[in-house]
Amino acid sequence: MEHKVWQGRLDGDTPLYHRLFQRVEEGGSVVAGDYVIHGFAVDEGVRRNKGRIGAKEAPSIIRRSMANFPVVSPDFRLRDMGDVFCEDGDLERSQTRLAEAVAQVLRKGGKSLVLGGGHEVTYAHYSGIRKAFPEKKIGVINLDAHFDNREPDPQVGASSGTGFWQIAQEGDIYSLHVGIQRNSNTLKLFDTADQFGMKYILADEIFFENLPSLYLRINEFLEEVDVVYLTICMDVFNAAVAPGVSAAAYNGVFPDSVFMMLYRHLLKSEGLVALDVAEVNPLYDDQDRTARLAAALVNEWFMV
């Protein structure tokens, strides 16, 4: 990780002027309440899933896009623990490394924030949460156009599209998928979701008049679980606002006022301990629009 990513406009040194780059610490010991960043500079799972590779370059760009946001809480602390890489094609080892690092953060009372990278980050991040909370029900909320519940190809192995299938093999799965597109998932994937008990909200259901119903469904899901992990695949958004992804969704959702009300409702969950953004692909981005949107969504968590 290059230190220059944490730079921004310096208006003053007192807390009233602070921006994120002034409050971030690199490395060190985690204290309860810290937001702790790990970069997942990996897209081996995207390659295995026959997607557009390039997402491994995203973590530093997302950091740079985050750096200038204002700090709104006097007690806010942000710690950056650097990146996990996958230079040898051994995706599973990289996932294990991230899982162990995440578990350490959560055991110390920190909040885990991972910047991807491909959506193979889901299984790694979940595994870390499971290590930290082995006896708790972990609810995963997936903002995504896809279920990512494919069975791994025995000749290729796990990929960016298999995370929820892998989670389901470890026991009961508690997941809610928001933004699912009918034209991005085969009937087999819908059937697999039903077989595993995966709950979902279609992209077509996200409109203002339907918000009360969606809030109710989300609240019912949250009541079933003890801790919450929110994962955001940037291909849930329309390609007009998020062109730089591994698999663009041209009929994806827009981050308008309706979406933001729903998103902020999710962020207010008392059980939320972990969040990540995935599939930002700088090779296909335009003026860092996708990375900036990802950074803005992360920053919303800091403002709750």
Image (spheres, grey):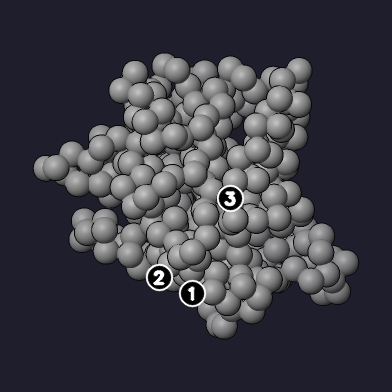
Q: Are marks 2 and 1 in contact (CB under 8 Å)?
A: yes
As helix, strand or loop, the secondary structure at mark 1 comes to helix
Distance between mark 1 and mark 3 Cα atoms: 21 Å
**Taking 36 as reference, is 220 above or below it?**
above
The three-letter amino acid code for the residue at tag 3 is: Val
Residue linked to disc 2: 100
Quarter residue 256 falls in:
top right
Of pointers 1 and 3, the one earlier in the residue sequence? 1
The three-letter amino acid code for the residue at tag 2 is: Glu
As helix, strand or loop, the secondary structure at mark 2 comes to helix
Give residue 162's position: percent from left, percent from top: 32, 41
As helix, strand or loop, the secondary structure at mark 3 comes to loop
| 2 or 3: mark nearer the eye | 3
Residue linked to disc 1: 104
Task: Give the class, few, some or many, for how many residues have Cα within 10 Å of label 2's Cα (few <14, many ≥20).
Answer: some
Is 229 positioned to the left or the right of 51 in the image?
right
Is residue 38 something that shows in the picture? no
State the residue in front, 250 or 226. Answer: 226
The three-letter amino acid code for the residue at tag 1 is: Gln
Give residue 229's position: percent from left, percent from top: 55, 52
